[in-house]
Amino acid sequence: MTINFDATYPWAGMQAVTVDGQAMIYVPKFYQKIGTAPTGSQQAGNKGKWVSDRKLSGFTVHPAFMKDGVEKAGFYVAAYECCVDPTNSAKAGSLVGKAPLASIDFPTMKARCAARNTGTGEQAGWHLWNIYELAAVQTLALIELGTPDVQTKIAAGNVNSSAAVATGSTAAKYRGISELWGNVWHMVDGLKGNGTTIQIFDREGKNTYINTGVVANTGSGYTKEMFTSTGTGFDFNEVYVPSTIDSTAANGTYGDYYWVATSDFVCYHGGNWGLGAMCGLFTLHLSFVSGYSLAKLGGRLAKYVD
């Protein structure tokens, strides 16, 4: 069976829009079910994810669409990596043909994103994208592409050079979201370490951290499996955090690399310009603390829907 994703919800609703002068991609709300593919299906016996436009039996709203305990119609994610807003250098922007905003630390990147909040409507709800928003995009890409290996399926991106290139200048693009892997690392809010124990945003969109009690993998290698759930009841199925890895790429199942978790880490995603095949949609780096400021570390804007 061939699916026309361009005509199928929610992919059909992923539209390019301009919000407060910034190039954004609208991602409509979806509900998700996680389980085992039934007998007779192409993936019978394997773990599967299903999405729906409504709350069917066994489906729950993806937490990317929750804000302060209320379901939202969708969210906006930047079409391009953060750049300096040419109208106000204190703000992060999302514009084509610009140098990625880098060489600032994690708190400063968050502040540059939040600086867009100067009023209501288009001037409210801006933030550095978070782990649930990333996961929503990852899930839709995984279902549509049928593989986590975006470098093979779409394009390698800027991963074999010595510097970042301008925003929107590579083919590492999914549904209008450019440089989603490679070029510069993307800081991701909502996932951090308390020591090496994973803390993650609550599912209700209140942006309070829950200590999951799970110790992040402290090795480096190619991802084999992701965390699912924990003894404390926290559900990792809605995000993609590697639980087991292997030093050999052929033994991995996602094709992407994971870097060792160190104490009090913050989260970086996607890889940068010189990491080759290690880059990808599921590449994760938990080796840096929030005070790191490097030319290879950037970010991506997001915005809550009113």
Image: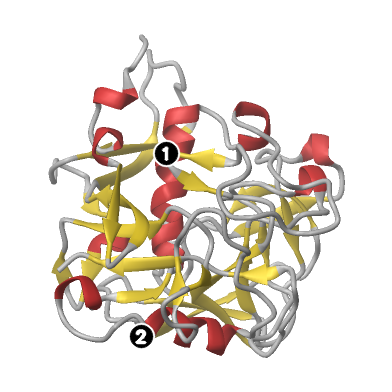
**On screen, residue 86 above or below 63:** below
- Front residue of 214/91: it is 91
Type of amino acid under label 2: Thr
With 262 as the anchor, is 216 left or right in this view?
left
Q: Residues within 10 Å of mark 2 (few under 14, many from 20)?
A: few
Render colour scheme = secondary structure
At x 80%, y 59%, the residue is: 163
At x 39%, y 52%, the residue is: 136
Q: Quadrant of the N terminus?
A: top left
Q: Residues within 10 Å of mark 1 (few under 14, many from 20)?
A: some
Assign a secondary structure to mark 2. loop
Assign a secondary structure to mark 1. loop
Residue annotated with mark 2: 208
- Whether the residues at callouts 2 and 1 have beta carbons within 8 Å, the answer is no
At x 26%, y 86%, the residue is: 118
**On screen, residue 24 above or below 217:** above
Q: Quadrant of the C terminus?
A: bottom left
At x 22%, y 51%, the residue is: 29
Percent of width and height locating residue 150: 61, 36
Q: Is label 2 or label 1 in front?
A: 1
Percent of width and height locating residue 228: 49, 56
Which quadrant holds residue 3? Answer: top left
Residue 237 shows up from this direction? no
Type of amino acid under label 1: Arg
- Front residue of 51/37: it is 51
Residue annotated with mark 1: 175
Marks 2 and 1, how far apart at CA = 30 Å
Residue 41 shows up from this direction? yes
Identify the disc placed on residue 25: none
**On screen, residue 11 above or below 229:** above
